[in-house]
């Protein structure tokens, strides 16, 4: 493929089923930036971070781990969309993250069984007591409250100027837990078959759509696999795609992996292995007319072009590549820019690579990436200290 043809492929607008238009095919994938202020509200650094990606040419930035409830956060640096949130700060974030004709959407989630222990009492679809993970099970009444939580958060997102929302049903957080047999042992209408395990997700989608109307984009992130024996299988995940095809979803973001103790991380390895979920995305595209975005392991312009050219995906999710170069979209769309140089870490401590990229997000938001040069151990120490410092503030603001 000639260079200009590749550029045309990346730069082609994507019109979503609701009628909204993404200006190109390059999307900043959701990451837990953990740049909130410790009371669920945005900060100047967080706002600047998303402004930089918009300046850098992305069609859409997704804000990772935005909570629908303050009682089950993934981290105490998450944003929370509930009554009492800083709507003025959210409007500034939405406005500055959507310059240059970009979209910015919060990824709406609930950590469930993986809620941050220092500030929560985790609850999942079923009670669990395994090494490294204990949680209570949600009551039927609590499950019935979930669609309303997501709908109210989506309404706040729309009212404060965000261009859409993404429902988080991946990576082992609550809606993903309902889909996984490892988390979901329920014997009622919300467990058992894949149809039962999907039920609450369908109810959340319907509630969100009723709340925001037909023309507001609603995406979803799903797992292609939990990467665990006994977890979500490829075939069940494809059934999820079939069921999503009967909903009002506008964009399906295919990813994988979970933070269940002992799970292999797709992204925390020492070496790269190329895009992770292309073959699943290719199969999924045969089952739905809803656009498919694929996220995971995209490191080069050639990877992105190949996924679009071969029909495996309609849009490309980039996370760490855009942390290394926030103007990567402009570089790739120009046809002149190169690929980011990914650091290589020998024998990293557990969580060290994630911490390094998370702390680089902070540096980007403070326009200080040129001075960013910590070791993995230093990054991990700073990352954990930041969480610890925010926990008392979170508890004081939201209660236990």
Image: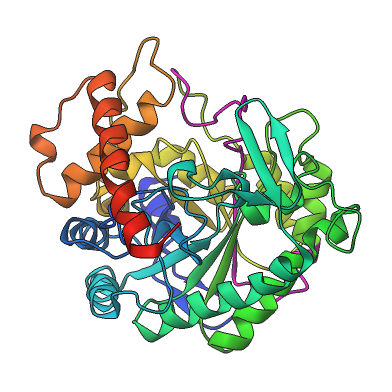
- Quarter of the figure with residue 129: top right
- Is 139 drawn above or below residue 309 in the view shown? below
Q: Quadrant of the C terminus?
A: bottom left
- Is 359 drawn above or below residue 10 in the view shown? above
Q: Position of residue 48 (x, y in %)?
A: 18, 60
Q: Position of residue 396 (x, y in %)?
A: 32, 59
Q: Position of residue 188 (x, y in %)?
A: 90, 60
Residue in front for this viewpoint, 42 or 69: 69
- Quarter of the figure with residue 385: top left
Q: Is residue 250 magenta?
A: yes
Q: Is residue 122 magenta?
A: no
- Is 75 drawn above or below residue 303 in the view shown? below
Q: Position of residue 321 (x, y in %)?
A: 34, 40
Left or right: 183 with respect to 331? right
Left or right: 157 with respect to 361? right
Left or right: 147 with respect to 74? right
Range shown magenta: 243-270
């Amino acid at each position: 493929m000639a260079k200009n043809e590749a550029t045309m492929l990346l730069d082609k607008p994507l019109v979503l089923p609701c009628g909204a238009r993404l200006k190109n095919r390059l999307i900043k994938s959701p990451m837990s930036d953990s740049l909130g202020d410790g009371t669920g509200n945005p900060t100047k650094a967080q706002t600047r971070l998303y402004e930089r990606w918009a300046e850098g040419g992305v069609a859409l930035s997704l804000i990772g781990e935005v909570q629908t409830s303050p009682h089950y956060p993934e981290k105490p640096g998450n944003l929370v969309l509930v009554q009492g949130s800083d709507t003025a700060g959210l409007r500034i974030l939405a406005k500055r993250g959507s310059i240059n004709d970009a979209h910015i959407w919060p990824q709406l989630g609930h950590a469930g069984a993986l809620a941050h222990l220092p500030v929560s009492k985790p609850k999942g679809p079923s009670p669990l007591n395994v090494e490294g993970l204990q949680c209570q099970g949600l009551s039927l009444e609590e499950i019935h409250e979930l669609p309303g939580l997501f709908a109210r958060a989506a309404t706040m997102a729309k009212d404060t100027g965000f261009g859409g929302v993404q429902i988080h049903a991946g990576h082992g957080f609550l809606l993903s837990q309902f889909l996984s047999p490892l988390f979901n042992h329920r014997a009622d209408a919300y467990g058992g078959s894949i149809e039962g395990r999907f039920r609450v997700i369908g109810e959340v989608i319907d509630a969100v759509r009723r709340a925001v109307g037909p023309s507001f984009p609603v995406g979803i992130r799903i797992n292609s696999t939990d990467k665990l024996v006994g977890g979500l299988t490829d075939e069940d995940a494809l059934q999820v795609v079939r069921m999503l095809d009967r909903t009002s979803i506008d964009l399906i973001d295919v990813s994988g992996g979970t933070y269940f103790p002992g799970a292999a991380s797709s992204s925390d390895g020492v070496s790269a292995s190329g895009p992770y979920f292309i073959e699943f995305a290719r199969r999924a595209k045969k089952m739905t007319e809803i656009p498919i975005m694929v996220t995971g392991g995209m490191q080069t312009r050639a990877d992105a072009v190949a996924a679009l050219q071969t029909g495996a995906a309609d849009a490309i999710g980039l996370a760490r590549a855009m942390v290394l170069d926030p103007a990567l979209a402009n570089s790739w769309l120009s046809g002149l820019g190169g690929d980011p140089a990914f650091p290589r870490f020998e024998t990293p401590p557990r969580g060290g690579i994630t911490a390094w990229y998370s702390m680089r997000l902070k540096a980007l938001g403070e326009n200080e990436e040129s001075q960013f040069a910590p070791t993995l151990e230093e990054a991990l120490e700073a990352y954990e200290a930041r969480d610890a410092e925010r926990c008392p503030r979170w508890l004081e603001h939201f209660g236990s």
